[in-house]
Amino acid sequence: MSANLLIVDDEQMIRDLLCITLTRENYTCFPCSNADEGLEMIKDLEIDLALLDVMMPGSSGLELLKELKKISPDTAVLMITALSDMETALSSIHLGADDYITKPFSVDNVVMKANNALEKRRLIIENRKYQNELEVKVLEQTRVIRAAMEEINLSYESTLSALVRSLDARESEVGSHSERVMNYTLLLARHMGISEPDLSIIAKGALLHDIGKIGVSDNILLKPGKLTDDEWIEMKKHPQIGHDILSDIKFLKGASEFILAHHERFDGKGYPNGLKGTDIPLSARIFALVDTLDAMTSDRPYRKALPYATMVEEIKRCRGSQFDPAIVDEFIAIKREQWEEVAGHLFI
């Protein structure tokens, strides 16, 4: 293999012998008589291997070694030393030299050590290049996977949104009730300091809260008048139906627990399980309040939207019975303008 070799030795004979020997191995040699010349050569050329005499007039080979490693840390180095200065030769290894050659030396030993040092250098550089390429590939694959996951998530979100819009349309909802209450729920949850991943679970639960109404017949769901006792029994099954639909879907399991409890009341008079107080999941307690907010401030087939102030008074009146008192207080602390911004319209 071809390589550029720097030979720094104050003895002309040593320089000539090393140059002749290593040139025969197809290496290009650049001889220098002192450390200063060698340093200038290192600055001007890409040196693959340097052979440095330890003891020279002026700057020593150790001093040149230190400077060389600052400028070209990948350059392999062999130190040339007399038998009487073995301690210095060994200490040079700690400064970055790859090996040393003792005077007098055999040319075969020089060739062997030069080849070994250059092969070691080649392997180190190739390994670093491989590691860098591997890191780039890992980063690229990570980017691709993340993009794919984002696309899948967007597909999920689009599918879920389309599904709940069809459910809202089935009940003749004005606009998208499910998306509004999801946004209301997120506003209140964030105000209460809830963060990811809980926010994502809450969002899915709020969006899909009425999914169980798929299992309720149109005769009951769309009945214009008051429901009979038997019909109410059927209607009250929708949280359980929704839970059963979603509980086996891994990424919606948390949302299914929300859905099961979204009609529970703080005083224990809700359904389907009559949970009370903090036995009700926090997300469901938040939702119960904003569901009322939306119901009262939206037009219904049987009445127009009620004033914002009327809705607030009703929520205050149900503090401690239907709603968690602490959540009512958090709700009241949020300005009307914030609720209107989320709603996308002004309240009356």
Image (spheres, rainbow, N blue to C red):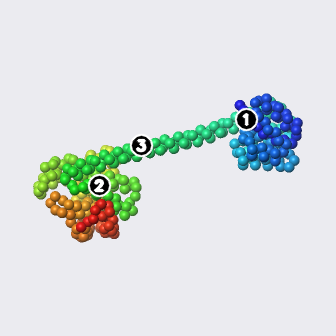
Q: Alpha-carbon neighbours of circle 3 within 10 Å: few (<14), some, or many (≥20)?
A: few
How far apart, in angstroms, are the residues tagged by discs 2 and 1?
69 Å
Which residue is labeled 2 in the image?
A: 179
Which residue is labeled 1 in the image?
A: 3
Which residue is labeled 3 in the image?
A: 148
- Disc 1 marks a residue whose amino acid type is Ala
- 189 versus 220 height, above or below: below
Q: Earlier in the sequence, mark 2 or mark 3?
A: 3
Q: Position of residue 122 (x, y in %)?
A: 67, 36
**As rendered, which of 39 and 112 lies closer to the eye?**
39
How far apart, in angstroms, are the residues tagged by discs 2 and 3?
25 Å
Q: Earlier in the sequence, mark 3 or mark 1?
A: 1
In percent of the image, x 15 and y 52: which residue is there? 222
Q: Position of residue 209 (x, y in %)?
A: 27, 53
Q: Earlier in the sequence, mark 2 or mark 1?
A: 1
- 239 versus 288 height, above or below: above
In percent of the image, x 45 and y 42: which residue is there? 145
Classify the position of the N terminus by image quarter: top right
Residue 53 seen in this snapshot: yes
* In this rendering, position of residue 143 left or right of residue 157: right
Q: Position of residue 296 (x, y in %)?
A: 22, 63
Residue 267 seen in this snapshot: no
In percent of the image, x 25 and y 50: which residue is there? 165
Quadrant of residue 175 within the rendered picture: bottom left
- Disc 2 marks a residue whose amino acid type is Glu
In percent of the image, x 27 and y 47: which residue is there? 163
